[in-house]
Amino acid sequence: MINEKKAQLANESFYEAFNKRDIEAMKQVWGSDEGITCVHPGWPPLKGFEPILNSWAGIFENSGDMEIRISDVQVRASEGLAWVSCTEKLFTIAERGVLASQVFATNLFQVEGDTWKMVMHHASPVPASRGTEDTSRN
């Protein structure tokens, strides 16, 4: 249970760095191994620390007013590896109002020293269902 809590805190740090658009905080979240991987929705996989951090820097510079709220968080952990799955609800302020979309994410964390570091982020769009509310009309 202790490792699940630590992994959940590491996952929360990732989303906090995203919502603050803080590239220095994002650097602290990610592991240093060259095998780390990031798959943004609709992007090819990125491998290695520099390409991944460059992608986040570009997203932070070009995303405008965007916020992610997570739900349906599931955490599993072993002694040195943890995986967190969740639904990301993305809200973006645009000219015609607030646009909302959903993404399903799987985040993998590995212990480096005594810290949980992200080694994979894989996010895939979730198709809108008929019951999905269009917040741009509110």
Image: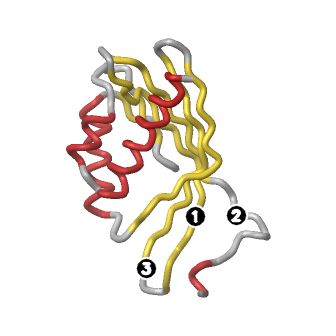
Residue at 36%, 57% in the rendered image? 19
Measured as percent of width and height from the top left, residue 132 is found at: 72, 69
Residue 38 versus residue 14: which sits nearer the camera?
A: 14
x and y, in percent, of residue 118 in the image? 40, 30
Residue reaching furthest to the right: 130
Is mark 1 in CB contact (under 8 Å) with mark 3? no
Q: Residues within 10 Å of mark 3 (few under 14, many from 20)?
A: few
Contact between marks 2 and 1 (CB within 8 A): the answer is yes
**Tag 2 residue:** 128
In the image, 79 versus 88, the foreground residue is 79
Residue at screen point 55% across, 28% down: 83
Tell me the residue that label 3 is attached to.
94
| Residue 44 in view of the camera | no
Tell which circle, 2 or 1, labels the residue nearer the N-terminal end. 1
Mark 3 residue element: strand
| Mark 2: secondary structure | loop
Q: Which label sits on residue 101?
A: 1
Amino acid of disc 3: Ala
